[in-house]
Image: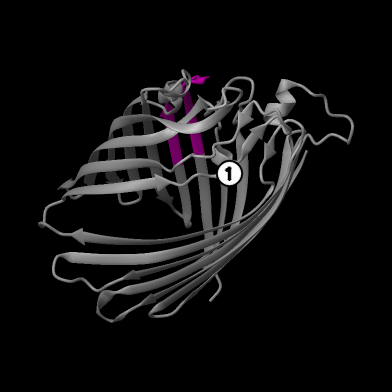
Amino acid sequence: MARWAVGFRVDWNRPSDQFTVLGNAYRDGLAQPAPGQISISFENIVRGNIKAWGENLAARWSHGLEGGGNLSVQTYYDGTDRTVQPTFGESLDIFDLQVQHSLPTLGNHALVWGAQYRYDRDRVRNSEFVAFLPADVDQKWASLFGQDEVALGKDLLWTAVSRTVRAPSRLDRDTFAPGNPPFVLAGGPDFRSETANVYEVGYRGLPAARFSYSITVYHTDYDHLHTLELAPSRTSVIFANQMQGHANGIETWGTYQAASFWQLSAGFVQLSQKLQLKPGSLDPQSALATGRDPAQSLTLRSSMDLPYQTELDAIARHVTALSNPSVPAYLAVDLRVGWKPREQVELSMAGQNLFGTHSEFAGPSTRSELGPSVFFKILGRFL
């Protein structure tokens, strides 16, 4: 197994302009066997023997306008090539351009609008086990958005109503198995966008100079969710949108300034979901997806500014178990030590999952365990 990654970031700042360029490149080989030495087993088909590489480059310009408005333009390129033997291989190039304009405040209104254009070039190397048909696809997306934030008073109570849409991907429409006919899975020719309508109410409080907190309560209605249905021909199955449901939750966060050099924070999330099949659906498994998100999670954070330009951060996370697939609850602890020998230079060492190994998703036969790891970072800022 061989892995490496390299990246950079450059920032330029002027009174009314900020410009950022960042890029990354990586190579990743996970237990890649020599040709002809792959055993055809369920484990290899599901998990695969993975070889991947990729590069990405992004640039962002932000310009402050007279009267308090702002204009920002962001573009990026992401290129990947991934081989999962013996299942499939893919070469994917994505180009993206985004523009956002924030208007000066108009009375109680804060108006923002923007546009996005994305193009991707997807080339798949199919196998006898699975195929994406057609194998070669060029896709384009264009979108517009607008937002009006209205200040109703000077207190810290807020509310929001939003709608999110997940457009169909190639996995939803173009996946066929096996790789040649007759197909058991025949794609999702009529698969449509999944939707969620979200309603939120929140409150931010500052009861004391050293203590602040926030509480958010939300309700989400889902529709057209992913299911697996019998095709009209009755000889194969297809992907469809025969599930709906809702979720209720609460998110809380509090921060306490214990001393001038020490800040403590805590957050808690409670989630309740219910998904159900629409009349006529023949998929008994998709509704079990209710158990794929943890019902509760708790996060504790400590941040200390120590002498000699040194920082010490600690984070503990407890996440409850998942029911489908069955994943045990876990407690994870991360530590970070940072040192700034000069204003423009920062050295840090971080340890993650220091006191054990845990899983976060997927069934026992396919999931990966996250164990202890240590990272070193050198950050330089140049004028």
Q: Answer left or right for 84 relative to 64.
A: right
Percent position of residue 224, x then y = 39, 36
> In the displayed structure, would residue 176 be above or below residue 362?
below
Query: Foreground residue, 193 or 370?
Result: 193
Position of the N terminus by quadrant:
top right
Q: Answer left or right for 32 relative to 258.
A: right
Query: Foreground residue, 138 or 232?
Result: 232
Percent position of residue 46, x then y = 68, 28
Query: Foreground residue, 26 or 118?
Result: 118
Q: Answer left or right for 268 relative to 43.
A: left
Segment tinted magenta in the rendering: 314-334
220 drawn magenta: no
Percent position of residue 166, x then y = 44, 45
Q: On the image, numbered disc 1 is attached to which residue?
A: 170
Q: Quadrant of residue 254?
A: top left
Dominant secondary structure, magenta? strand
Q: Is residue 83 at least partly visible in the picture?
A: no
* Type of the residue with mark 1: Arg
